[in-house]
Image: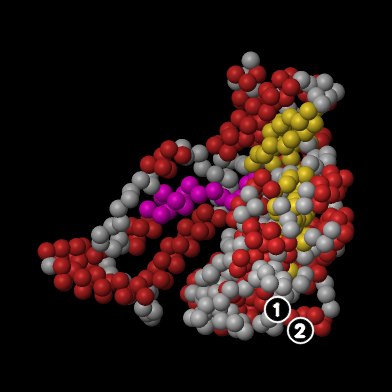
Amino acid sequence: MTLSEKEILTINKFSQNDQVLHLEIGEYVKKMFTPTQGKSLETQIDEIANDFSQEFLSANNANTNIDIDLIIRNFGDSKIPTQPTDFESYFQSLNENIIAHSIHTSSPQFIGHMTSALPSFVRPLAKLMTAMNQNAVKIETAKTLSFCEREALAMMHRQIYNLSDNFYIQHIQNNQSTLGILVSGGTTANITALWCARNKSLGAKNEFLGIEKEGLSAALNFYGYKGAVIIGSELMHFSFDKAADLMGISTQNLIRVAVDSNNQVNLQALRQVVADCHEKNLHIIAIVGIAGTTDSGSVDPLEDIAEIAQENNVHFHVDAAWGGPVIFSQKHRHKLAGIEKADSVTIDGHKQLYLPMGIGMVFFHDPYLASSIEKHASYTMRKGSFDLGKRALEGSRPGMALFLHAGLKLIGLKGYEFLIDEGIRKTQYMAARISAMPEFELLAEPDTNLLIYRYIPEQFRAVIVKQQFTEADNQIINNFNEYLQKMQRQIGRTFISRTTKTTISFNKEIPVIAMRAVIANPLTTEEDIDAVLNDQIQIASEISNSYFLK
């Protein structure tokens, strides 16, 4: 049962009597928390929300063309309402000011970011998860969910490492073991992996109590190092900058190694960097391999990096936030060969596991590695307990494991295999279309289901084909592509993101502004891909006489 607008108005008239007002509002607020029979507040909101969500999900355009300044003007109030707002007017405002102009990430022609449509079971499951309101930090607030989470993580661990039945029988529900940690996203997963690597490699020994208790400076001094570094390709995700900063080694000691023409780390350069670090007496916390760069989806040669790491007794971490689910594909799994040799692996659920935001995962080959970051408190996360928070960076967190568990069960191995195979197949289709169209230049053959390309204005097409363009030509083409991408986003019919790729020309590194396509949405068809490209051609023709080409 809810108060009508008339009753709300009545409450507001009690402002001359604070005590009555307090009691009346109290009764109204308590009704928000009380389960009721019949058409409750929750039922009414459900009906409104379902209408809004169906309308939102059925939209074809990627975006609306509303001006950002107008959006900003709609959100300039810093005062909390004194009286409760009636829900009908609030949800109407929500629809007009937020939902109506939100990005349609589920649109089949929104193919520019690592966010797409969600399976239909997610929405009712989200309501259930919210109603249960489990706190996954400790077993006292997430009794069954804690074991459900461990089971779901074990399923993913087995897909990566494929260890024996006995291994999983021993570790899946062993409170001393940690096969994986569920976190809020890939950034936290990468930070957690390197945190574990740092603490394990600079742990307690003899009279030294370990980096956790004595700090980085004391640890390096005890072990005889002049500094500490993390090594990976120049295409490492910016989360590693955050990790280097947080761990106190500075971003200057995040060593980025050059990549080759396929956007894979240069192995010869990597070996040289490792040798240089040894010569300078620098401690290598980890070597990072990438399974699906955020720019182009390329995969590093993981087998070779694993070998380098093993030879030098260094932690090998694979950032597979994007490309990790390729392990579900029998046809394409070979592209991730060597991932099973990683000491730790990051995978993001909200990317190619088709789960909502807030599900990152880090997995460990050694089930005892995470003990290097274990923390306890007298009121929670007790030693020897099943409390998940004792080996995690985050404390209180929602029961997002329900989504992971449901996805693995309801979609299954073959379902995920279909999704991965289709994404890569359609990306290869788009690459072929781009290669066949004179308006575009494919900048790299896709490894997975990301690709980068650029639009070539007509007057430059011949020199691009002959590779006879100048730096000035390249700058004009860059400016044109940046403007084209902004216009496509503003118009809102379709969407492609952009990035900057560094390439070697004129005997030096030059920037190339590239269009970046992400083909993950299972609803995206070849016709949608053609529509996106044709939209770019149409917009380009409309702006071709701009000052860029004068």
Q: Tell me the amino acid under the disc marked 2.
A: Gln
| Residue lying at 54% horizontally and 48% vertically, measured from the top left | 103
Q: Tell me the amino acid under the disc marked 1.
A: Ser
Q: Relative to residue 471, is residue 352 depicted above or below?
A: below
The residue that disc 1 covers is 177
The quarter of the rendered structure image containing the N terminus is bottom left
Please report contact status of discs 1 and 2: CB closer than 8 Å, yes or no: yes
Residue nearest the viewer, comparing 472 with 343: 343
Badge 1 marks a residue whose secondary structure is: loop
Badge 2 marks a residue whose secondary structure is: helix
Question: In this orientation, does residue 538 appear?
Answer: no
Report the label total: 2
The residue that disc 2 covers is 170
| Residue lying at 74% horizontally and 75% vertically, measured from the top left | 367
- Residue 470 picture location, percent across and down: 76, 20
Region in magenta: 93-115
| Residue lying at 21% horizontally and 74% vertically, measured from the top left | 23
Q: Is residue 112 magenta?
A: yes
**Residue sticking out furthest to the left:** 16
- Report, in whole angstroms, how far the alpha carbon at label 1 lies from the one at label 2: 9 Å
Magenta portion: prevailing SS class: loop
Q: Is residue 107 magenta?
A: yes
The quarter of the rendered structure image containing the C terminus is top right
Task: Locate residue 449 relative to residue 349 in the image: left or right.
Answer: right
